[in-house]
Image (cartoon, helix red, strand yellow):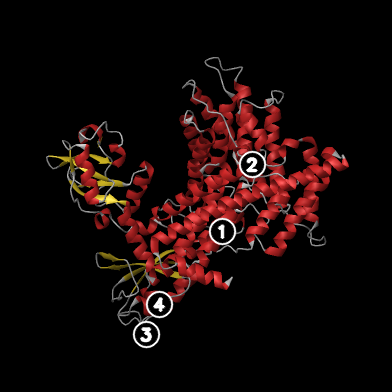
Amino acid sequence: MIQFRRWARDRFATRGAAAFLTAALVVGVLVGLGAAVLVWAIAGVFSVFESVDDALGWGKWLLLVSIPIGLLISWSLNRWFGPGVASGGVTETIVATSLHGGYLPTRLIPAKIAATAATLGLGGSGGREGPIAMIGGTIGSSLARYTGFGHDQIQSLVAAGAGAGVGASFNAPIAGMLFAMEVILRSFSVRHLNAIVITSVMAAVVTQQLVGEERLLTSPAYDLADPLQLVLYAALAVVAVLFGVAFIRVLASTSTFRVPSRLPGWTLPIGAGVLIGAIGLVFPDSLGTGQRFLSNLLAGGGDSSEAWYALFALAGIKMVTTALTREGGGSVGTFMAALFIGGVVGSGFAQIIDPLWTFSELEPGAFAVVGMAATFAAVARAPLTSVIIVFEITGNYGLVLPLMLGAALATFLGDRLYADSAYTIALTQSGIHLPTNQDIDLLDTVEVVEVMAPIEEPARRDMTVDQLTDLLDRTHHHGVPVVADDRLVGVVSYSDIARAADGETTVASIMTDRPITVTPSLPVSAALARMAALGLGRLPVVSDSDPGELIGMFRRESVVRAYHAALGTATGRELYRERVRLRSQPDAKFFEMAVMRGSPVSNAMVKDIPWPDSAILVSVRRGTTVVIPHGNTMLQPTDALTFFGTADARVELGHIMEPAGVETTEWRTE
């Protein structure tokens, strides 16, 4: 193993961006293989279960034995290989990415596959998407560590692996990409994007080739037959939120259960397994992943004998069996369970409304589709992932308006009814508060004017496509602004050229007029958010006072280079890690302290001062100027220092900065 690590470091660590993207591709292939192995393992264990059932002839009663055995195996693997084996997997991956530098031990990969196969193959309730997300994240973490990549690249590969696992399970690479950024990273930072895209696509391709589509969730295409039905879809979103929040509450309530100290630990998986098996005798569709039952609903309403109240009851039972499986030591996730609950609720809702709605014909399958997206948005607080994954499952954009409406409304209402998602509730109960927007706060200090690119050569309205192609080739850009009389009139890119009839077509006929722009004083964080929201790679920069005066171009690559350079310094990396660690502590906050004459820190460099471990220097206010500190920044008398840290760190800082003969409390500022 040591020789392999040395070989991997020699091949990857010193080869820059190309080596990193190659590593992302390798992670995608490995995650695709891992997802396929997990599917095969679950199917293999289930095949053994069926063989035993045929031999014994116990029928459904075998569940009273098989489920406890599956939970006991998973519980035992968790004790042998460490925490994380018997869990959903997504929460643990988020914590590893945010607080542990992306570290996930390699030994979790085989243990997680075995635990999930035993849990689901023997009848446990839940999904495989959470476990495969953790398996994918662990693959990314292991490869990144073996190849010697830095902290930031490890985070990218962990998130990429996790998202690729989800995308591979559904053959939905775009949804996997969004899951990585929206749920795992909780950030849409562009520096992670390339690796995540490559990994997600490669994993989905590999899994589909190995497993085929018959084991994936599928649905026919649906369309919005009548715009008036949007009212019904909005009502469905409200119902889906109630079920989604109920699911989170069930997960929260069962997570506090503990085995009495007088009983051995193995009684928990045995007891929970027997209870789940007993429920499964009455509600067999509440066990397993539920993909087959859900696919039937998506195809047009499922079994016609299932009344709406039976479907609603099944959704509630699914919450209970999934929660019991997780807390009984099983390795299952909540992703598929949330989709199952949403699909069942959507189909049942359509049955209730259908006799009352006389304006147009209702498709129960379409309501099941929207119910899935709305419920998952409420459970995971990931509206983009919920919409896109349904797009990719159905392969059709006909329900785009109901899906967007349902996901947005469900996220909005879910936030107000219950603060935590299914992935953060366990952390909140443990007193862990993860940081949010950890990339945007750094970019808030940089304005567009500092990173915008100059206008090398704009396009003209009367240019032909052939002339434009030559211009783009010379400037090595994918898009340029279009000007007329030195005024911005549009933007044009290679994608616009593809729509041209021939090389003599003019730029005026293919360009995008009235383009979205940014101004020089806008924070880079806001410009990036605008760019991501529109799916663009560049934005014209116009004067603050004149929206037609073109002064530069805001391009993605310039910001990425600047941000990587900041993180590349030793001081920058340590400040970044320390900020993330401190922001997870509830009592940490911003405060300001002044540098007095005679203070030990006066005329000293930042890197030479013994700062407390629980505080981070954020900025230095020098007169009317704000300085972003670096290791070589020299502190001067009368500087006002802004810190982020705990109350204890503030007291310690007071003693460090206290001038001789001066009481700290007299010169500390609020």
- 4 or 1: mark nearer the eye: 1
The label shown at residue 487 is none
What residue sits right under mark 1 in the picture? 139
Identify the amino acid type marked 4. Thr
Report the residue at 35% width, 82% height from top.
600
Mark whose residue sits in front, 2 or 4:
2
Q: Say whether marks 2 and 3 touch (CB < 8 Å).
A: no
Residue type at the position of mark 2:
Ala
Q: Secondary structure at mark 1?
A: helix
Callout 3–callout 4 Cβ contact below 8 Å: no
Tell me which label, 3 or 1, sits earlier in the chain: 1
Looking at the figure, which quarter contains the N terminus?
bottom right
Q: Which residue is mark 3?
A: 661
According to the image, label 4 marks what residue? 664
The answer to whether residue 586 is visible is: no
Q: In the image, what residue type sits under mark 1?
A: Ile
* Amino acid type shown at disc 3: Gly
Mark toward the start of the polypeptide (1 vs 2): 1
Q: Marks 3/4: CA distance?
A: 9 Å
Dot in front, 1 or 2 = 1
Query: Which tag, 4 or 1, sits closer to the chain's start?
Result: 1
- In depth, the one of 183 and 602 nearer the eye is 183
CA separation, marks 1 and 2? 24 Å
> In the displayed structure, does residue 243 sit left or right of residue 665?
right
Q: Which residue is mark 2?
A: 337
Q: Are marks 4 and 1 in contact (CB under 8 Å)?
A: no
Q: Earlier in the sequence, mark 2 or mark 4?
A: 2
Looking at the rendered structure, the secondary structure element under dot 3 is loop
Q: Residue 33: horizontal and vertical position, in percent?
A: 59, 52
Characterize the local packing of mark 1: few (<14), some (14-19) or many (20 or more) Cα atoms within 10 angstroms.
many
